[in-house]
Amino acid sequence: MDKLSFLEVIAAIAAFVSLLLAVFLLTVKTERRLENRLFAAFLIVNAIDISGLFMHLFVESYNLKAFKISAYLLVMPLFYLYVNAVCYSDFTLKRKHFLHLVPFIVANLILLPRLYLAEGAAKEEFFATMWNSPEMFFYQAIGELQYFFYIIAVFLILKKYKEIYLENYTNTNTLLYKWLSQLTLIFLVIHICIIFKNIVRYTQHRDLFIWLNIVAGTVSLLAACWFILKALNYPELFRRIDSTLQPTKDFAETLETENKTDDTKSLQIEQLKKFMVEKEPFLEPSLTIQELADQVNIPVRELSVLINQHINQHFFDFVNEYRIKKAMTILKDPAKKKYTVLEILYEVGFNSKSSFHTSFKKYTNQTPTEFRNN
């Protein structure tokens, strides 16, 4: 089997698996219908894009092949909308989101005169030299600008998501941020490979061009499969946040200018710490800053400023510190030597072994087992 045939087989397998995963996401019964549909659409468009490597075996239509090329401009908008749907509980598709179709529409409009409306020999001649035409240079420029625009936009969404999450929640949902960041980085690396591939297209290195196609298509598929498996294995970690929530820094200055003396703030901090020790609200695994604010009778924004600006901790770290302290007390208690580490982490409010170990080591520079033994 030569390299081109091998590439066609790999592409066919990748397209088939992408479509299979898309069908699964569209048919599985879940509350997360919007994000599943968006990721399914993302996989379908990727399958269409990959199909260009073997489409000539089944289709002779130049119009369809050109449409396949322009479909690439739908990949990043779909991924961007998917990230929004995963991160924000109140995200819905609106009319304004049709603006994401503009690059795709523009790309097809510039191909309209010399490809879609052309006939016979003129269309055949244009398609033969298409990648050297002004239209395709313009298309590639649109594609590169669009890709990096969406990559930056996705990282900004994830940065805001992590910041808000750490300031308002305490369970292990930071894994969602980590996985989406990793997936986005993988897509970025793949795209750099594609840029290199497009440069090689205009050289004599045909073999290198083919192998870069194989690598880009295979890695893209593996990354999508990896993320779907993560989502299926850890559905409880995909906790979304309200998009109307703001980072503390956005309203801290306004609250600080109100008539709150340093003595008042110190008293509130003292009361808060006393409440945490005596009432132990941190034992609730899904504790949020809103729930704690209701319990201590402090407005949620004031509480957020107290913890983030004056105690100088994220709510996430603030609560987990009390959980670790309680875990340390249990680990030191000779009467509780029979308790396993897993039993202890659930007892003090954690719901993830990895999160407990990470927080414990961050606070003590030891693992729970090392701490108990020492």
Image (cartoon, helix red, strand yellow):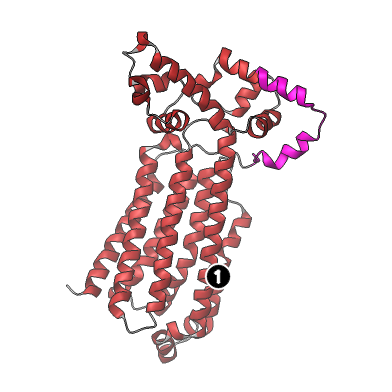
| Residue 318 x/y as whole percent | 56, 28
248 relative position to 328: left or right: right
Q: Quadrant of residue 247?
A: top right
Q: Is residue 247 magenta?
A: yes
Write the residue at 44% across / 56% down: 185
Q: SS for tag 1?
A: helix
Q: Kindly tell me whether residue 280 is visible in this rendering.
A: yes
Q: Is residue 327 above or below residue 90?
A: above
In the image, the segment drawn in magenta is: 244-271
* Residue picked out by circle 1: 105
Q: Residue furthest front?
A: 374
Residue 334 or residue 240, whichever sits in front: 334
Q: Is residue 266 magenta?
A: yes
> Image quadrant for the N terminus?
bottom left
Residue 258 or residue 173, whichever sits in front: 258
Write the residue at 67% across / 17% down: 271
Q: Quadrant of residue 329?
A: top left
Write the residue at 59% across / 59% down: 98
139 relative position to 262: left or right: left
| Residue 146 x/y as whole percent | 54, 66
Q: Residue furthest top?
A: 335
| Residue 14 x/y as whole percent | 30, 60
Q: Residue furthest bottom?
A: 121
Q: Residue furthest right?
A: 259
Q: Callout 1, which amino acid?
A: Ile
Write the residue at 45% across / 85% down: 132
> Image quadrant for the C terminus?
top left
| Residue 125 x/y as whole percent | 41, 90
Q: Kindly tell me whether residue 284 is visible in this rendering.
A: no
Magenta span: predominant SS is: helix
Decide: few, some or many residues near mark 1? Use Cα within 10 Å; few <14, some 14-19, many ≥20: some
Q: Is residue 361 above or below residue 151?
A: above
